């Protein structure tokens, strides 16, 4: 079975469809055929025939041995193995070939550096809008890293959309440099199962991960020599090699890293309560400073709806009906704490 054969398969039966009803009927019966489906399910002969044909193509039904019209149900796991076994093996072979080619190409880097004297001068700021070119630049920069890879990443990064360049996913392909990698994530990342799984993998490869309430915008710094930042008006990126700018960005990122909490990818209720309290404190500070809901949500890397819900809960706890009243209550509390501390 080829990839085209798989893409041409019918949809897996969903609840409420004739195909799902026929499969359920088959699971509960010794066998089924078109006439029994019509009689017991109240569907037309054409619907029964189409449903059975779809299920046979999905390997969820097969003919009773020696019979040409009666079918029995098949375990979905067995069906998927029958459908995908050949493709799984082909995919494993392809991945092995790609990894072998990658290693062979990387083995040429010492030869390249030793013999190529005409290395072009990079511009201080290079704007790259083509996703394929940007992906290649990110890979090259990280593969050639010698000392450190500092990375600040939002878990709700718009580049995670399939149509755009994946500014976070490339890390999964840069395992050879994981021992140099330090990743800074927002506190909200601790609640994301997908992120926790990635963190565990990264830590297993020798990387480090920390979380902070409010992290710098998407930012990559390699060897204190080059920084990568997203462009403001599209899916591209800018590569910065101006050393004064790179140094300033690195100071910002390392400062945030030093104040951040280590994250091992685990989840427990005590840690969750602590993280939630830190987020609430940050929301209160930003409310006191008059920031809008969407700005607070963006800085904390939470959805606008979640941010507004937490603000409503905090205002209720303060006994405040308006933002102005909440700010006044918070201000009063702050002054009382200052007097007690004095």
Image (cartoon, rainbow, N blue to C red):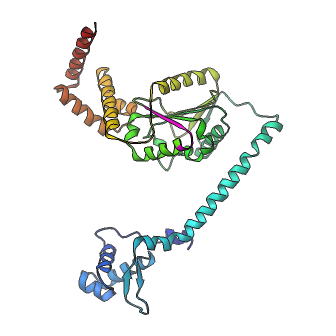
Magenta region includes residue 210: yes
> Residue 78 at x, y = what percent?
44, 73
Q: Is residue 339 above or below residue 91?
A: above
Number of disc labels: 0
* Screen quadrant of the C terminus: top left
Point out residue 85 in the picture as x, y percentages from the top left corner.
Answer: 53, 70
Q: Where 273 sits versus 34, above or below?
A: above
Measured as percent of width and height from the top left, residue 67 is found at 41, 92
Instruction: Report the residue at 26% width, 15% height from top.
Output: 334
173 in the magenta segment: no
**Which sits in the foreground, 93 or 136?**
93
Q: Residue at x 64, y 31 (%)?
A: 147
Classify the position of the N terminus by image quarter. bottom right
The quarter of the displayed image where residue 250 is located: top right
Q: Is residue 119 visible?
A: yes
Residues rendered magenta in the picture: 204-211
Q: Position of residue 181 (x, y in %)?
A: 57, 36
Q: Is residue 103 above or below residue 295?
A: below
Q: Residue at x 32, y 73 (%)?
A: 20
Determine which quarter of the picture holds residue 111: top right
Q: Is residue 291 left or right of residue 242?
A: left
**Which residue is more in the foreground, 98 or 182?**
182
Q: Is residue 174 visible?
A: no
State the residue at coordinates (40%, 47%): 193
């Amino acid at each position: 079975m080829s990839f085209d054969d798989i893409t041409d398969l019918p949809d897996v039966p969903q609840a409420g469809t004739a195909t799902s009803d026929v499969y359920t009927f088959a699971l509960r019966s010794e066998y089924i055929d078109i006439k029994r489906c019509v009689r017991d399910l109240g569907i037309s002969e054409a619907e029964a025939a189409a449903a059975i044909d779809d299920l046979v193509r999905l390997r969820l039904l097969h003919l009773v041995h020696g019979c040409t019209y009666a079918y029995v149900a098949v375990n979905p796991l067995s069906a998927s193995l029958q459908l995908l076994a050949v493709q799984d093996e082909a995919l494993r072979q392809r991945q092995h070939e790609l990894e072998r080619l990658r290693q062979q190409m990387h083995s040429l880097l010492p030869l390249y550096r030793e013999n190529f004297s005409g290395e072009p001068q990079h511009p201080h700021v290079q704007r790259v809008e083509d996703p394929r070119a940007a992906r290649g630049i990110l890979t090259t920069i990280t593969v050639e890293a010698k000392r450190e890879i500092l990375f600040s990443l939002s878990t709700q990064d718009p580049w995670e959309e399939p149509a755009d360049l994946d500014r976070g996913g490339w890390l999964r392909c840069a395992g050879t440099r994981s021992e140099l990698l330090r990743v800074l994530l927002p506190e909200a990342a601790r609640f994301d199962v997908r992120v926790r799984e990635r963190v565990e993998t990264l830590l297993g490869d020798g990387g480090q991960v920390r979380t902070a309430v409010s992290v710098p915008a998407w930012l990559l710094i390699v060897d204190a020599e080059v920084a990568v930042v997203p462009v403001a008006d599209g899916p591209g990126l800018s590569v910065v090699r101006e050393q004064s700018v790179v140094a300033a960005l690195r100071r910002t990122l390392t400062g945030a890293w030093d104040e951040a909490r280590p994250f091992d990818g685990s989840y427990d209720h005590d840690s969750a309560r602590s993280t939630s309290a830190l987020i609430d404190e940050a929301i209160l500070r930003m409310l006191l400073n008059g920031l809008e809901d969407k700005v607070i949500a963006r800085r904390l890397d939470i959805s606008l709806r979640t941010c507004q819900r937490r603000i409503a809960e905090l205002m209720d706890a303060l006994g405040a009906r308006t933002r102005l009243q909440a700010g006044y209550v918070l201000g009063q509390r702050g002054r009382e704490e200052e007097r007690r501390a004095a």
